[in-house]
Every structure is written in C-alpha cells, then in structure tokens.
Amino acid sequence: MQTPIPHHIVNAKIAENGIQNIGSATIRQIAKVVRDIEQATGEKYIKMEMGVPGLPAAQVGVDAEIAALQNGVASIYPAIEGIDELKTEMARFVKSFLNIDISPTSCIPTVGSMQGSFAAFLTACRRDTKRPKMLFIDPGFPVQKQQMNILGLPYDNFDVYTFRGEKLRQKLEDYCKTGEYSTLIYSSPNNPSWICFTEEELQTIGEIANKYDLIVIEDLAYFAMDFRTDYGTPNVAPFQPTVARYTNNYILLISASKVFSYAGQRIAMLAVSDKLSERTFPDLSRFFSSTEFGKALIYGAMHALSSGTAHSAQYAFAAMLKAANDGTYKFTHDVKLYGKRAQKMKTIFINNGFTIVYDTDIDQPIADGFYFTIGYPGMNGKELLRELLYYGISAITLDITGSERSDGLRACSSQITDSQIKLLEQRLKLFYTNHKYN
C-alpha cells in the first residue's frame, strides 16, 4: 500500500535503533526513531508519543528567572531544601488550590517530578525492611516503573479501569492485607487514560492508607486539568481533588512542566505531609544519616541525587506560583487549549474507524485533555503503532503503561498545531481507506 512514509525506511530506522519489539519501546526510543525518519525523508510527523508542552512558557516565570540570573544566582549553590520564597509559595499553592494546610518546611523543590518520584521511592520504599513493595494503580507513567527497576525495588500493579467506585476498596484490600506494601502511587488526571478519581475513590485510598500505614504518592502532573470542572481560582471551591484530605500519609508531586509549560527548566515540588515528614522509621538508618522521614528525603536522597535544584529555576517557579496564588495569572485558562485540541483529534480518529479505548470515567464520557487512548479493530497495539508510523503518526502502546488493554495506544494532544489537524485528518483518511473493515 502507498503510504506517506516508505515502509523500508521506517523498518530500517526501527532496526538501527536496536528495537526488537516496537510495542515495548519507550517514549524516548519512539521519539528518537521519529527524528531519524524525519531526517531521512524530510517528512514531518504528527507527534503524539511524548507529553511535551505545546504552549509558550509562562512569561512571569521567564522574567523572574532572567532577573535571578542577572543577579548572580548562577554562581551560588541553592539550599537543598529550596529557597525561602519558593517554599512559601509552594505551601500557599497547596492551600489555595487543594485547600490543604502544609508548612513551607514540608515543600521541597525537585528537578522535575521525575526526580521527585525517584527521591520519594528511594525513601518511602526503604522505611521498613519487611515492606519494600510499591503498588501501582495503573495505567501509569512507564518511567516510574523503570525507576523502581533501577533501584532494585519490587512492585505490583493493576489496571484500575474495571475497579472504579466501590470496587476499588476490595481490590486495594486484596493487595494491602498481605502486609507486603509500604507505598502506592497513581496519577489523577491519569496518564495515559485521562480518568480522574472521584472524592469517594480518593477517600477509599486514604482510608486504606491509614488502615495499612501506606504512603500514598499522588502524581498531580496535570494539576487542575480535568476541564469538566474549574479548579483554577485560588481559595475558592471547587478545589483539585486529592487524597490529602483523607490521610496524613501523603506525598504530592506537583510539576511546573505542564500547567506552566516550564518543562525545559526541570522544576517541580514534593509536598510531604507535615506529620509524615516528622515521623521516624528506624530502618531508614540503613541508608540515611537520619531516621526522620523528611530529613532522610532531603539530606539523604535529594542531596545524593543532585545537591538541590537549579537556583534560577526556583525563582521562576516561585514567581509563577505567586502569580497563581495571587490570582493575577489564571494558569488553567491557557492549558484548556489541550482539551479543545483533544476533542478535535478524537473526532477525526473516530470518523476514520478508530475507537477510544478508555472511553468512560465511571458513568460519564472521558474528559478531553492532555492524553487520550485509541484503538483500531483487528489490530493490537504493537501492530497499530508500527502501521501508524508508516502514515507519519507516532504514539506509544498501552502495554508499557501497566494497562491490561493490549489493543491500544496513548495519544498526546500537546504538540499538534492547528495546521497539523488538517494533516492528521488527511493521513487518517488514507489509513482508513487502506484498512477499511466491514
């Protein structure tokens, strides 16, 4: 079949990158293959594999970082625990948009949420020699499992899609009653399915955490991006749903990458419950000089990983958070573009024979946002990914996210421009013509 990208070039570049199974390829491997194909052919791809922000960085952050650099901070090591003004605005942000009280001491800047999760895993999963396991409520971000593998830490996972609502409690009980787990993690809004946990489900997770003394790591990379509800007004309900209302055993990952489009500077925060920060765990002495959780996290894990977070980026983050807290910058207004774009993209996919794999959020249609999932009748995810590469469209399989759905792909709306929407439609029409099913 005639395709926009010749089959032999796609197949050659996959082989040259040492990828044996395209269905198991990581996000960065797919991105590298796509770059190589673009260089070889001169054809531009519709890039849906990587969650790169498609909006300009928040100007208030850019201005603050430039000013900080001009003031000489580049030559000075930042304090590992973060600069005071940033820690103050972090605590304000948690109060303003989640309605959770937390002290600035318990808010720590990290080199993106990737470093935040790595440091959290390093500490939380080593607090009890008898309970080293992590439980992933999937589907989820594939690299977090890679982090666990690098650390040599065990984990289990389950796809939550068929265990929503009341079913979630029993599923968690079945795992947690074994006494093997110290920690559990999930994202909401979810990467890749875009499901969002309800307050009732978060309460269930919090109650299970209290019952079995689990640390809950809540990944809020897509903070307030469930656009069905406006969570973007500081100190005014409704607030971003969070497990922190139901347990003191929480760590929140809040990133500047998506909501402020500040991904390039690698800045985020860990917000650790005050009570968890102050708790002592004797088994931490195996790896850290302090058995107090917060001190082990900061002066043990964070110190060893990077000796702190880039100084100038901390001033940028502080300025963006302050503007959001003061109400002078409505950050949710800009990122709503992703939802509008996803709606257009999903319509084009559906009109050309595709299905939405994770299509409902309990009893309502899945929201339009940063990610959505697609499938095509008669193809598994591996087959569909390779076939779409011939049509100049890239994505990742759901296989690598912990999903039980081997028939689908994760699509990201962030990098698609208005002009590419038309190109996407043209390429999918050709795909549909060549793969029409009865």
Image (cartoon, rainbow, N blue to C red):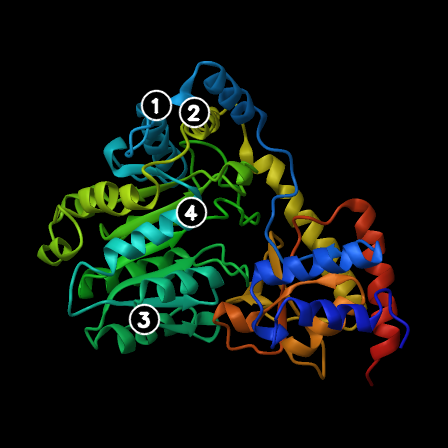
Percent position of residue 4, x then y: 86, 64
Percent position of residue 117, x then y: 37, 52
Label 4 vs label 2: CA separation?
17 Å
Residue furthest to the right in view is: 2
In the displayed structure, 363 sits above or below 272; it is: below
Q: Residue at x 45, y 23 (%)?
A: 326
Q: Residues within 10 Å of mark 1 (few under 14, many from 20)?
A: some
Task: Name the element at disc 4.
Answer: helix
**Going from the N terminus, do you reach mark 4 or mark 2 first?**
4
**Going from the N terminus, do you reach mark 2 or mark 3 first?**
3
**Going from the N terminus, do you reach mark 1 or mark 4 first?**
1
Amino acid type for the residue under numbered disc 1: Glu
Horizontally, is 112 left or right of 389 in the view? left
- For disc 3, the marked residue is 169
- For disc 1, the marked residue is 85
Task: Name the element at disc 2.
Answer: helix
- CB atoms of marks 4 and 2 within 8 Å: no
Q: Which mark is residue 113?
A: 4
Label 1 vs label 4: CA separation?
20 Å
Residue furthest to the front in view is: 16
Quadrant of res 321: top left
**Going from the N terminus, do you reach mark 1 or mark 2 first?**
1
Q: Residues within 10 Å of mark 3 (few under 14, many from 20)?
A: some
- For disc 2, the marked residue is 315
